[in-house]
Structure formats: structure tokens, C-alpha cells
Amino acid sequence: SQTIHQWPATLVQPVGSPLSLECTVEGTSNPNLYWYRQAAGRGLQLLFYSVGIGQISSEVPQNLSASRPQDRQFILSSKKLLLSDSGFYLCAWRGQGGNQPQHFGDGTRLSIL
Amino acid sequence: KQEVTQIPAALSVPEGENLVLNCSFTDSAIYNLQWFRQDPGKGLTSLLLIQSSQREQTSGRLNASLDKSSGRSTLYIAASQPGDSATYLCAPKANAGGTSYGKLTFGQGTILTVHP
């Protein structure tokens, strides 16, 4: 069966520090991968998606970047965090085929001080 | 741009009641629609995926319907239990192609509380 792992579960970082959140998927190959942010009181916002290794699409301009160095690994990064980067970050994957459901990880709670 | 509205925003019911959660979306050109639940501080759990050609999809006590032409979906929960307490989110998926490939647009969710 397929599983998705995200870490860390919680992270507290000072303003201006770098960020690296990692997501890996097991039990499938060539998944579509997604990064979302859920800010307090707001809906889920799609940040990045990837349909293959090295292929990244950004949905909104921002202080973050994403990379996909391996087929089942998706990394969210920032060189310098802003207060506005606080939120709940969720990674998701979907199998190939239009009617495959998206599956989410347990999320990372990021607090910027 | 797709916009998704979920009504009610919050719902509190006694255990055992049947209930309906509503989802409406502005762009009816969708590929499918997914319902999720989210427990506090957790990720999303997929409940049901209903394809654009389907009218209904069932899983246990859950039944989702889709009226694509009118931009509506409902999630019916039968015989509600305290363990059903969570936020329920609907997310229509855009048709493939262009910048909206595979993109889900989420509503704000309905916060459901089922009390014993």
C-alpha cells in the first residue's frame, strides 16, 4: 500500500532563517506531488505541484521554492523565512490517471518568531 | 477562477442524526470532486471521489452526490457518531490541461460536531 511521510511535524524558526521541509511517498512510482499551505482561518492554498523529477510548477509568487530531486521526494525550501510564512504545510500525492484521488500527509506546523 | 462555497460553516448535531453538508462551485467544467475530512492539527483524509460522469458515490455511511451542471455536491452522513466530528472539505478538480492541470480548489470547510 502507498504511504506518504512528512517531516518534521512541528517547526519553530526565527525570521530570516532557511527552511527545508521534506516529503516522501512509498509504494507508488511517478506520482504527481503537491505542496499546500493552510493558514489559520483560511482554506488550503496550492503552492507547488510536480508531475515528474525536476518538473516544478508554482501556483503563487512567494518566498518559497520546491524541488523534486527523486521520483518520490518533494522538498519545500526557503532561503529566508518571513513572518507571513507561518502556517500548516501539507504535502500530497496522486497516482497517474485523471480520476485518482489525492492523498495527504500529516502536515508540518511552521511557526515563525 | 473556480470558487468553492461550503454551507453550513459549522454544524452541531446529536448522535444518531442524519445530516447533509453542501458544496457549491462556480465553474462546472470539472473533472471530478473529492470530499475530505480533516481532524484538528492533522492532514486531510480522502473520503470519496465522484467522477464528473457519476451522480453518486457511496462508502459505508457516507454518500456523495454531484450535480455538475448546477455546480453542486452534497455529502450525506447517515447515523452520525461522535467520531465523525471533524472539518469536512470538498474540492472540485479542474479539467486537465493548461495551468490548472490536476488542481483541486478547496472550500473553507464545514466544522461538524456530533455530541453524545
Image (cartoon, rainbow, N blue to C red):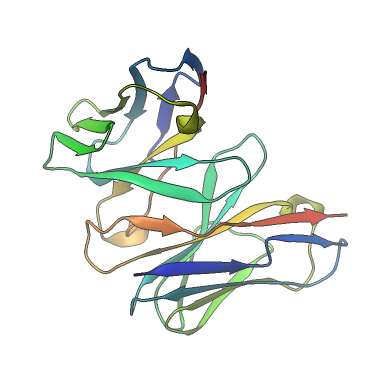
Is any part of residue B25 visible from this angle? yes
Q: Do we see residue B109 in this rendering?
A: no
**Among the 4 quarters of the image, the one containing residue B33:** top left
Of residues A23 and A87, the one nearer the viewer is A23
Q: Residue furthest left?
A: B53
Which residue is at 37% across, 69% downward? Answer: A2
Going by the image, does A112 lie left or right of A50?
Answer: right
User: Residue farthest to the bottom?
Assistant: A70
Image quarter hosting the N terminus of chain A: bottom left
Pick the quarter of the image with the C terminus of chain A: bottom right
Whole-percent x and y of residue A14?
Answer: 88, 62
Q: Residue at 24% across / 46% down in the picture?
A: B32
| Whole-percent x, y for residue A37 in the image | 59, 52
Horizontal relation, residue A13 to residue A38: left or right: right
Residue at (31, 61) in percent of width and height: B98
Query: Which sits in the foreground, A86 or A102?
Result: A102
Disc tally is 0
Q: Name the spot of residue A28 as percent of width and height, x first.
A: 34, 76
Rendering coords of residue A67 (x, y %): 55, 78
A92 and A5: which is toward the camera: A5
Left or right of residue B100, residue A107 in this image: right
Considering only vertical position in the picture, is A19 above or below B108? below
